[in-house]
Amino acid sequence: MIEAVDVTKRFGEKIALDHVQMLIGDGEIYGLIGSNGSGKSTLMRLFSGIYAPENGTVRMDGVPVFDRAWIKEKIAYVGDTPFFFPYATVKEMARFYRKMFPRFDNRLYQSLLEVFPLDYKARISAMSKGKQRQAALITAIAASPKYLLLDEAFDGLDPVARKTLKNILIDRAETCAMTTVIASHNLSELEFLCDHAGLLHEGKLIFSDSVEHLKGQLHKVQAVFRQVPEKPAFADLKLLKIERSGSLLQMIVRGDEADIMRKIERLSPIFSECVEPSLEEILMYELEGSGYDAGTLSY
């Protein structure tokens, strides 16, 4: 289990993270979402023990991470710019990981080399951006970490490699209860992969919840009326947004879907339907509902 308890991190006068509270369970695939500068990478480096917070604490398995080498043996971190030794090959980096991670799985390493077909004797620095990320992923996953931290995991990967990585992460979560945290601003990559998601904005955690619960509480309703009701007719709905185009109303409503549709049907629409919003739409509306300007969140 990963816990961030009232975590604050500053860089000079800038507050990168502001009293963040977060709980990530074992075996979860967690999407940490936010625009550039929101604090995602800072939080990931706190999780990995690279940074220490000014206030609060980051714990894994109930133990503070910073300056605890035996806890870090359970953590593999792939940053937004993966680290390699100068002139190192995949084979040489694997040799280093074997020394650092007691649970390094050689059989898994060999199978990953087949899944991501790299020349393990070639210098990583001479590879493309996508191949470099594949090299980092191979060694990190083969380390058999309990916690895998990926900053912009899909950056530079082609569609086949992206799908392959998703399948591997799901398999490791199911077979080994490996917890994966993926920091990204690419919501489409995370929507059908993550169990839980958290939104960071300007160093604050706007929310952290299961994707299923998020989608179950926010609904996009479309309804056509012969005579469009006045706005007071919708007073018993928790409307976040309503737009009209002729006789068509499009609404974003919070609450139970069946209850929402019952209330809509009482208004005698010609046609009505409830459409599941995308993860991006959910995050935008949650941001607006929290009093933030969603226009500042660029994906």
Image (spheres, grey):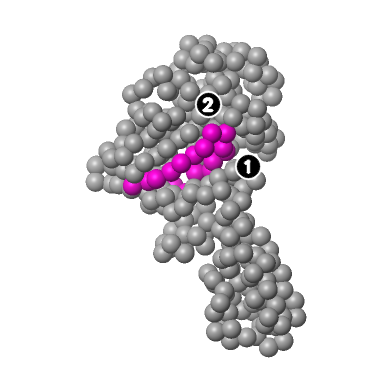
Q: Give neighbour class at mark 2: few <14, some 14-19, many 20+ (Cα, 10 Å).
A: many
Name the secondary structure under disc 1. Answer: loop
* Residue displayed at 46% across by 20% down: 73
Residue 99 horizontal/vertical position (percent): 48, 11
User: Mark number for residue 146?
Assistant: 2
Residue 26 located within the stretch drawn in magenta? yes
User: Which residue is most to the right?
Assistant: 270
Q: Which label's residue is closer to the chain start, 2 or 1? A: 2
Vertical order, 226 against 75 (above or below) = below
Residue 220 relative to residue 10: left or right: right
Amino acid type, callout 1: Leu
Residue at mark 2 to residue at mark 1: CA–CA distance: 18 Å
Residue at image coords 33%, 47%: 19
Q: Is residue 178 visible?
A: yes
Q: Is residue 158 visible?
A: no
Side of 229 relative to 77 (left or right) = right
Q: As displayed, is residue 131 above or below residue 152?
A: above
Residue 128 versus residue 260 in the image, above or below = above
Residue 264: x and y in percent read 66, 76
Question: Which residue of the protein is positioned furthest toward the left in this rendering?
Answer: 13
Q: Quadrant of residue 131?
A: top right
Q: Which residue is mark 1?
A: 193
Q: Amino acid at mark 2?
A: Lys
Q: Secondary structure at mark 2?
A: loop
Camera-nearest residue between 57 and 113:
57
Out of 45 and 22, give the one closest to the viewer. Answer: 22
- Magenta run includes residue 79: no
Quadrant of residue 12 in the image? top left
The x, y position of residue 172, in whole percent, is 63, 29
Write the residue at 61% across / 35% down.
157
Segment colored magenta: 19-37
Height in image: 99 above or below 59?
Answer: above
